[in-house]
Structures are given as C-alpha cells and as structure tokens.
Amino acid sequence: MHKNRLESFSDCVLSIIITIMVLELKAPTGTDFAALKQLVPTFLSYVLSFLFLAIYWSNHHHMLHTIKRVNGLILWGNIHLLFWLSLVPFTTAWLDSHPLAPVPTALYGFVLLMSAGSYTLLQRLIIKAHGREGLLAQALGDDTKGRISLLLYLSAIGLAFVMPLVAHLLYFAVAMLWVVPDKRIENVLKEHE
C-alpha cells in the first residue's frame, strides 16, 4: 500500500482538529483591552495545544518521508494516534475553563501522554515494517528525546493533583523540547538522497 492516502487523511484530520479548537475561542463581551484580560487563560491553553498539534503534524510529515510502504498495522497505529490527538480540543476547552484545577490539568496531560505513546507506537510499527536498516530506525537511534517527553508527561500528571502550575510548566517544557526542529530525520534523508 502506498503512503499518500495515509498522509492526506492524517493532514485532513489534523486540520479539522485545529479548526474545532479555534472555534472554541469566543470573542470577549467587552470592547476594551480589559475585556481581553479574562481570555488570557483560554488563549494560553489554545496556543499550547496548537503548538502540540503543529509539532505532531511536522514530525509526522517528516516521519512519513522515511517510509516506502504502509501495511495494516501502520494504518491502525496512525488511527490510534489521530484518536488521541482528536481529544486535544476537548481537554483544552476543559482546561481553559478551569486552568489550575487538578483533574482537568491531569486529563490534559493524560491525552498528551497517550498521544506521545501512540506516536512512539507508530514509530515502532514503521520500524518493524521497514527493518532496523530503514531510514526511520537510523534516524531515531535510542530516541532519548521521546523517552524524556513521556517521563515529563507522567511527572506532570502526578503533579497536577498537588501543584497544577508546575504540571503546566512541564507541559510547556515538553513543547519547547520539540519546537526546536528535530533534525535527525532530515539528516538521514539528506544522506540517502
């Protein structure tokens, strides 16, 4: 099976997820700058979630450039990832309604953790299909960055119940870890051109 349909479907789903999220942003009731102040938590949670979705889209795009074929396991692994990403608008909306509440903060982190875990699973399914000599396996190596992200998410979920602000900072730290473009895949692709 060719990868183009997988790529197109994933792009469409992520576009819809982002659209749903932006529709949650409501205009302030007032007409001055003070009216915007009440929207700061909403806007910050939107920006963080948008950033996560953009990071997933970018890395997913690069990852798919390393593969030649798609099998059923890769298709289902990709659907698994898209499922967890589709929950981002819901958890974002709940979080911006209750920014420092423990349960919304923890659930937001749980969805991020499951998204990261499903992305890792998708990577492993691709590596299994293409072998250890495949481009993705060469690029990832031991994937320290991915393991650190999972650990930070787990820590943040636990901290959400005692220090929600620290949990938010850990979510932000993971985003900053990934917002710097990951050159591993690009470098491997350049070597094999």
Image: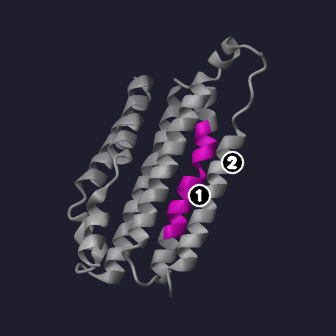
Q: Which residue is mark 1?
A: 14
Residue 176: % across, % down: 36, 40
Q: Is residue 159 visible?
A: no
Q: Regarding mark 2 in the picture, which secondary structure is present there? A: helix
Q: Regarding mark 1 in the picture, which secondary structure is present there? A: helix
Could you tell me if the residues under marks 1 and 2 are in contact, i.e. CB atoms within 8 Å? Answer: no
The prevailing secondary structure element of the residues shown in magenta is helix
Question: What's under tag 2, amino acid-wise?
Answer: Ile
Q: Which residue is mark 2?
A: 20
- Quarter of the image holding residue 85? bottom right
Position of 57 relative to 105 (above/below):
below
Q: Is residue 83 magenta?
A: yes
Please report the residue visible at 38 percent of the width from the left and 45 percent of the height from the top.
Answer: 179
Residue 169: % across, % down: 39, 29
Please report the residue visible at 32 percent of the width from the left and 55 percent of the height from the top.
Answer: 182
Return the disc, 1 or 2, that comes first in the chain's sequence: 1
Please report the residue visible at 38 percent of the width from the left and 26 percent of the height from the top.
Answer: 166
Point out which mark residue 45 bears: none
Please report the residue visible at 54 percent of the width from the left and 44 percent of the height from the top.
Answer: 50
Q: Is residue 41 magenta?
A: no
Position of 130 relative to 11 (above/below):
below
Residue 192: % across, % down: 26, 78
Instruction: Read off the magenta span.
Output: 78-92
Q: Is residue 174 visible?
A: yes
